[in-house]
Amino acid sequence: MISPYRLIQLKRDGGTLPPDMIEQFIGGYVDGHIPDYQMSAFLMAVFFRGMTAEETSALTKTMMDSGERFLPEDFAGMITADKHSTGGVGDKISLILAPLVAATGIGVPMMSGRGLGHTGGTLDKLESIPGFNTRLNRRQLLDQMQKIGVAMIGQTDTMVPADKKMYALRDVTATVDCLPLIAASIMSKKIAAGPQNLILDVKVGRGAFMKSQQDAAKLAKTMVDIGTAHGRNVQAILTNMHTQPLGRAVGNSLEVMESVDVLTGKGSKLLRELTIVLSAPLLIMAGYAPDEHSAITQLNKLIDDGTAYEIFKKLVETQGGDVSSIEPPYSLPLGKPVVLKSSISGVLSGIDPMIIGLASIELGAGRKRQDDSIDPGVGFLLHAEAGDTVQKGDALVTVFTAKPLPESLKTYILSAFEFDQEPSEFTNNLVLDRISPGS
Ligand code: URA
């Protein structure tokens, strides 16, 4: 048995860990022999020292094998696909994409995560729907895939338990924004859940974990290489998380409502556009569309004719959620509204997603400690987006909160709204780059 102390020391001092050491350390953490404080020290050492490609791939494999796994062939002949985002503010695309892609006939066994750092998580959003159960066991997942072709689940004590524990610890120890830890976390889950085709949405900018396009491209390439080495079809798209949050809603219940808005043909155009941009390559990889144009046409039709929304409702019902709560005009939990207005007139050039993300955690939409519970009713409804002209006195954002909103937090939230600034390198570009195997 390795000494956890020596392993942490080796990484702290810039050494390279052999695969068997990584395997024993992660195994010891999952079975409870290694405590959170040693794992926290290890994560921080990796944060500062990084990992080689070989270490990252060994970490991914160990995490992936830490529990039960699915193989593409477990889905009884079904062609499968999935998508994962590296995390952004207001990023609710999984809620729209999973039923939309499933509406084409492609199976979507989606394994997601909870809120991480200043970003929200798909599981927390889904759990704002009363009764929604994200903890399916192997049999339930396979049965549901046969029945409705889509399932949205999280890591459990038996499926990728290493990521379940490490993810929750990283969330509260400032060790999220670290390339090898993100790559191993995402790819261990995604390979373990078994989809054959995978699209990765790698967010770039001040509201993302990767601030520069260069770092995001490196992360994307690492993940594409890992997935390819495991026999999966993987592509990555680098997208803008700099200019503003994604869509008009930030916060768990509000993001479910905005997802349903898009699924019912309403809501943010940018959100619909990005969902389709990320879905189209899955149809092509899966052999369901010959090219992007045809994929986009199919996807638009499945939103416009209501098929994707019907599948979302079936998904909610099958996983125990209250379907009536997600039918417009919605009856999801929501705090009391407080409207914040602009004190100036001008053209809105951006809304700093990091400020909105941090303010949402402050109000209870995310966790500051591992045992914190989430308030699904906390949210931000943005009334303008970059490029809009705003007059003094116009509402900029409605904040939903059960807690009182102190003046200092109001001022902080309003500081996210930027007027008349020079366009940045990111402005107006939704898609920044695409990374395929070998690129
Ligand atoms: N999403 C994950 O699943 N893990 C990370 O580390 C970051 C985003």
Image (cartoon, rainbow, N blue to C red):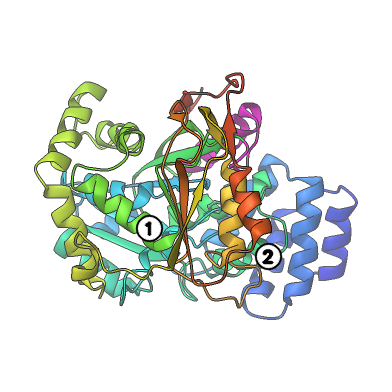
Q: On screen, 403 above or below 115?
A: below
Q: Quadrant of residue 109?
A: bottom left
Q: Give the residue number, with chain letter if any, for mark 1.
A: 254
Establish if 235 lies above or below 131. Answer: above
- Tell me which secondary structure the magenta stretch mostly adopts: helix
Outermost bottom residue: 32
Question: Residue 37 colored magenta?
Answer: no
Q: Is tag 2's residue or tag 1's residue first in the polypeptide sequence?
A: 2
Where's the N terminus, which quadrant? bottom right
Q: Which amino acid does label 1 sit on?
A: Leu
Left or right: 358 with respect to 375? right
Q: Residue at x 48, y 71 (%)?
A: 375
- What span is colored magenta in the figure? 206-228
Residue 172's label in the rendered image is: 2
Taking depth in this image into account, of 310 and 334 the one nearest to the observer is 334
What's the amino acid at mark 2? Val
- Percent across and percent down for residue 275 are 33, 39
Q: Does the segment drawn in magenta span residue 214?
A: yes
Residue at horizontal 13 percent and vertical 36 percent from the top: 301
Picture coordinates of residue 62, whole percent (x, y): 59, 60
Contact, mark 2 vs mark 1 (Cβ under 8 Å) = no
**Residue 11, x across and y down, in percent:** 83, 54
Q: Which one is in front, 86 or 281?
A: 86
Distance CA(mark 2)–CA(mark 1): 24 Å
Q: In which quarter of the image is residue 385?
A: top left
Q: Position of residue 147 (x, y in %)?
A: 15, 64
Q: In this view, does 235 lie above or below 251?
A: above
| Residue 435 in sight from this viewpoint | no
